[in-house]
Image (tube, rainbow, N blue to C red):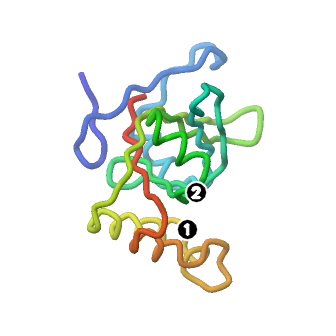
Amino acid sequence: MSTHTADGSTAPQTSLGPFSSPGASPTPWQATEWALRRIQKFQLCTVRRDGRPHVTPLLAIWALGAMWFTTGDNEQKAKNLSANQHCALTTGTDTLTGMDYIIEGTASLVTDQATRKNVATAFEQAYGWQLTREDGTWYQLGDAIRTGNVQLYRVQPDK
């Protein structure tokens, strides 16, 4: 029996890692989806052309049935994704116990104006004043998404 996301699409497979607690069971996708909506900092892992991994922290959001993030044209992650779209986004607790989340999927560059507009609004809602007030760390990122001044990626989770 397959499960579905809040938008009705098929939910990704959830699984446990080798160091999970004895007797643990996979977190249902619905609980993972809820957590991804409230978490603000992620790490993105991509692969360089020579096969070496590249990991970088970034802002990302879960919205419209996928993970979303932005980057500049000349950033290492953009260069990596132009050659290999497979990536992983990770996040979790900063303690030994707690929940960690790893989203594996394929990143697609998004150029559709209507989608960019919707995702920009979702970023502003998720990060609030940090994107909308002049004293915010990422002030005007929403506008940069809308105008195409940053690359916008959609990661459709596979696992």
Q: Which residue: 61% across, 27% down?
A: 50
In the image, taking residue 17 as reference, residue 154 lies left or right, namely left
Secondary structure of residue under mark 2: strand
119 or 149, nearer to the observer: 149
Q: Is residue 109 left or right of residue 136?
A: left
Rendering coords of residue 22 (x, y %): 63, 13
N-terminal-most mark, 1 or 2: 2
Please name the residue shown 59% across and 77% down the image.
Answer: 139
Between residues 30 and 130, which one lies in front from this camera angle? 130
Q: Amino acid at mark 2?
A: Leu
Which SS class for mark 1? helix
Q: Quadrant of residue 155?
A: top left
Position of residue 157 measured from the top left corner of the image (x, y, whole percent)? 40, 36
Give the residue number, with chain letter if any, for mark 1.
127
Residue 59 to residue 1: above or below: below
Residue at the extreme bottom = 134
Q: Residue at x 24, y 40 (%)?
A: 9
The local crowd at label 1, few if under 14, some if 14 to 19, many if 20 or more residues have their Cα within 10 Å, is: some
Where is the N terminus found, in terms of image quarters? top left
Looking at the image, which residue is at 32% across and 60% down?
A: 111
- Quadrant in the rendering for residue 152: bottom left
Picture layout, residue 55 above or below residue 74: above
Residue that sits furthest to the right in the current view: 95
Q: Mark 1 and mark 2: span between their CA atoms?
A: 9 Å
Q: Are marks 1 and 2 in contact (CB under 8 Å)?
A: yes
Quadrant in which the C terminus is drawn: top left
Q: Is residue 80 above or below residue 119?
A: above
34 sits left or right of 93 in the view: left
Residue, disc 2: 59
Residue type at mark 1? Answer: Tyr
- Residue 129, image x, y percentages: 58, 78
